[in-house]
Amino acid sequence: MKIENTSAARLDAVFTAQKRCFRTGATLDPAFRKKQLRALLQALEAHEQALADALWQDLHKSYEEAYLTEISLVKAEIRSAIRHTARWARRERKATPVTIFGSRSYVVKEPLGTALIVSPWNYPVQLLLNPLVGALSAGCTAVLKPSPYVPNVSLAIEKMIRSAFSEDYVAVVQGNREVNKQLFAQPYDLIFFTGSPALARSVAAAAAPNLTPLVLELGGKSPCIIGRDADIKLAAKRIAWGKTLNAGQTCIAPDYLLVHPDVKEAFIAAFGEAVRQLHGDDIKTQKHYVRMVSDKAFERVSGYLGEGKVRYGGRTDAAERFIEPTLLEGMAPDAGVLNTEIFGPVFPIVTLDDPSRSFEDQVADYVNDREKPLALYYFGKESEGWSIVRRTSSGGCCINDTIMHIVNPNVPFGGVGNSGMGRYHGRESFEAFTHRRAVIATPTWFDLPFRYMPYKLFGLVKRMV
């Protein structure tokens, strides 16, 4: 199946209609926003099976995994927004300094306007609809652009959105990067883009002429660190789960391993056993193991297998786009597997064995010598994990776990540096689509004289400020 590009004329018409809709002021009422969020929840529930079927067709993603990693997260986000939108939208009273005595100070939350949300193919439901929840709760209109690499999902989402919303409020447009270029050139009030750092640079360049604000949710090479004191069996289980989830096609998947040399062999054995426990004796036959999204992705990721020595796994099947979870070691420093985000189930092991330096020092230097990742994972004593957190930077982090920081709506999700800018989830989603507007309300029944020329009370004012 191939997605057809939405015409340039329709892109312009949708953009114009949404601008007109926003200017009516209908989206400003929190009651209206909550009603639309309920409509989105109802549509998601009505189309849940169709979305799950499409995820199976495009990615070989089982219903269970589709529900846990996509649909359930969106439902939770919607329900949270329904509960809290009215409170989030209230104006906030702020303290007022003595220099403007008598005035009252506020922060008013106003929607940015018409938003463009562009999502990738790896979690095509969650990564498109969770930002939409933020847009609706903030009072924005939204144009959604799903990925053409998962055509069944993209068409199922379009059908779902059309069932719930008029096009001048929420619309879905389809197509390839040519459509993206046309969209990015339009003067949206916000572009929310999830994808690779390389593509994000082109998005930023296209948005620059209009000074369009951006939220960029990207990726990078997220390190997974295993200290000498780690619970190896539990670490292997949680790491194998995080790496095989969606076959490693996850922006926050552990990308490479930094393993203390004293526990490396024990970890390799435990990782293989953990994969067998999770997926059975033959992972290829198991319904819960996802395939590469395309032949191109299969060729790229399977090509990494020749860059090092296979310590576990290594089987592939091009016809099914199947790659077995694989541990590699012995790579050259300039190997692609060590310098490009893998986005697949290949897992390079980097050996840090300088006897003159502590493992912690070597880890910190290795991570800090590279671009800031979207996630960082540490297994071992919690105190040592906090030390690594203090000495490094990443979008998010788990100590003795992987992936799970994305689950908590009460903490922000987002990148830093090369892994992104801006954040969302929970209240952060509302804030991402909101302008915090300062308002000072000054009385007219008296007027402080010291601010006016010729500053007769300057001596007094100088002491006050």
Image (cartoon, rainbow, N blue to C red):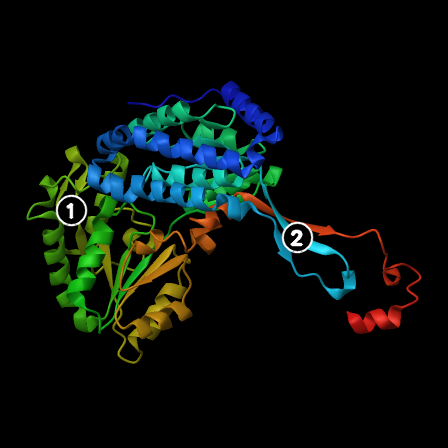
The tag on residue 324 is: 1
Quarter of the image where one finds residue 193: top left
> Residue at (41%, 31%) from the top-left corner?
39
- Give percent across and percent down for residue 199: 44, 41
Residue 65 placement: quadrant:
top left
Secondary structure under tag 2 reads strand
The amino acid beneath tag 2 is Tyr
- In the image, 294 versus 458, the foreground residue is 458
**Secondary structure of residue under mark 1:** loop
Q: Position of residue 396 (x, y in %)?
A: 39, 58
Q: In front here: 464 or 101? A: 101
Q: Amino acid at mark 1?
A: Glu
Q: CA distance from mark 2 to mark 1?
A: 56 Å
Q: Is residue 311 above or below residue 147?
A: below
Residue under circle 2? 106
Q: Is residue 178 visible?
A: yes
